[in-house]
Image (spheres, rainbow, N blue to C red):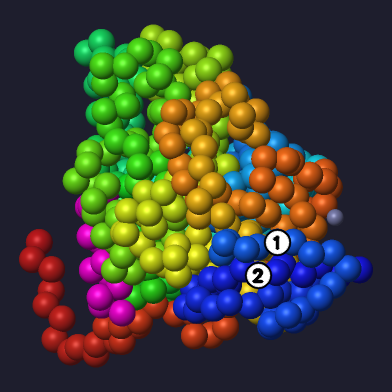
Amino acid sequence: MSTVIKGGTIVTADLTYKADVKIEGGKIVEIGANLSGTETLDATGCYVMPGGIDPHVHLEMPFMGTYSSDDFESGTRAGLAGGTTMVVDFCLPGPEQSLLEALQMWDNKTSRANADYSFHMAITGWNERVFNEMETIVKDKGINTFKHFMAYKGALMVNDDEMFASFQRCAELGALPLVHAENGDVVASMTAKLLAEGNNGPEAHAYSRPPEVEGEATNRAIMLADMAGVPLYVVHTSCEQAHEAIRRARQKGMRVYGEPLIQHLTLDESEYFDKDWDHAARRVMSPPFRSKQHQDSLWAGLQSGSLSVVATDHCAFTTDQKRFGIGNFAKIPNGTGGLEDRLPMLWTHGVNTGRLTINEFVAVTSTNIAKILNVYPKKGAILVGADADIVVWDPKRSKTISAKSQQSSIDYNVFEGKDVTGLPRYTLTRGEVAIEESTVKTKEGHGQFVKRQPFQAVNKALSTWKELVAPRKVERSGIPATGV
Ligand code: DUC
Ligand code: ZN
Ligand code: ZN
Ligand code: ZN
């Protein structure tokens, strides 16, 4: 049994060319002219691209007194419908919980996944057991990324000493640290002040975490990573202050990766003002939506390469869940969806506007992600031997985004009413057709865990810390007596 994708134009992060793609046993086995197989998929007029990888999703996540509504079944189905063939979720150990116990819990959620998935492990506290377990996580469990929350004080947040210790451990293990960069102490203090002054509506959420708290935390994380001699991945980069810090570090030669979200690229802070409570609350996420100037900065970063990838932070809550925060914005579960819409929205607002080339589109939605997370070229590639995670992209197909026709299980969509042009004709997960235009053919349980190996020794920031401050003992005679 073989499948041939025929008559399309292959688009990778660096090449555009006409060829057929032959698939057998879930892998790409041949690329060339006039291929034949048992089954043919017509790609005339379409681009044949590596399926999207979403490096940042929260499926069925326990958070703020509830669980995010999309699970591994609906979440991966939504992803496939929009051309995304792999997701990376965050395993969040509870207070005092071991990393391995938490991983078992996360693993138990995945049996109905329709597409492949991987995990980042969160470091939510620091002790000797965590230090030791990190090695097992990297060497035996195939997880080479550790997430650190600099916000959510009293819940997920780690302090600088804990984060610095974990960064150093990542450096030893060939793992990559990730940060949610917002100054959690300042957010907590601004939140308390706003509430005390009677600002309890969803718009106050945006006031409680201005761009400065993100810029400060991004700078701090970069400096700590440099001292630890480890690269850094900054999730949901939403503002110029954070982008500036990333740009500066990269210019110095550090491997720092910034991840804007499709929501921050296309929606702005006006969503919180002069709108009804539900509208604004549905868009409460951290970091919040920003002004147009910040959006321009993010687009410029994708164009110049100072920002590396586009994600969603898909963390979907229903309107009823959002209403937990009526009377207190700090209780609105933080999060928005986007898994199904990331590729069509980025194509429409990036490629169709001329901001991004089609090759840059593939880079930031798939190939760069696969490389940074160390799963390239199994994922993120149209190459012989790669997994046949492929999207046959019809640049002429269009639709209006609506919650009525979405795969996600929530009752609204933050992109409601937006027109997109550029949609999958077919989405294939390891060679199986999961989406054919608007027909969903996903198979529950088809998705598999993708192991990611540690990085090799070159995985070091270009830090000069060791030369600069390695302690040099100074021998002195003549120590003055204390002047009592
Ligand atoms: N931000 C969100 O909006 N939701 C999930 C976690 C996060 O950091
Ligand atoms: Zn976050
Ligand atoms: Zn997140
Ligand atoms: Zn299958």
Residue position marked by numbered label 2 in the rendering? 7
Q: Secondary structure at mark 1?
A: strand
Number of labels in the image equals: 2
Looking at the image, which residue sits at the far right?
1
Residue shown at 67%/40% (left/top)?
A: 438
Q: Is residue 221 above or below residue 98?
A: below
Q: Nearer the viewer, residue 413 or 183?
A: 413
Q: Which residues are magenta?
A: 239-253
How far is the residue under mark 2 from the one under mark 1? Answer: 6 Å
In the image, is 57 to the left or to the right of 473?
right
Q: Residue furthest left?
A: 483
Q: Position of residue 177 (x, y in %)?
A: 49, 63
Mark 2 residue type: Gly
- In the image, is residue 292 above or below residue 468? above
Specify the quadrant that holds the N terminus.
bottom right
Residue occupied by mark 1: 42
* Residue 291 seen in the current view: yes
Q: Which residue appears at 42% of the width and 34% of the height?
A: 418
Quadrant position of residue 440: top right
Decide whether residue 60 is among the magenta residues: no
* On screen, residue 214 above or below 245: above
- At x 39%, y 57%, the residue is 351
Q: Which mark is residue 411?
A: none
**Mark 2 residue's CB less than 8 Å from ligand 4:** no
Q: Position of residue 20 (x, y in %)?
A: 69, 75
| Most common secondary structure along the magenta stretch | helix
Amino acid carrying label 1: it is: Asp
Magenta stretch containing residue 244, yes or no?
yes
The answer to whether the residue labelled 2 contacts the one labelled 1, judged by CB atoms less than 8 Å apart, is: yes
Residue 121's place in the image compared with 291, above or below, is below
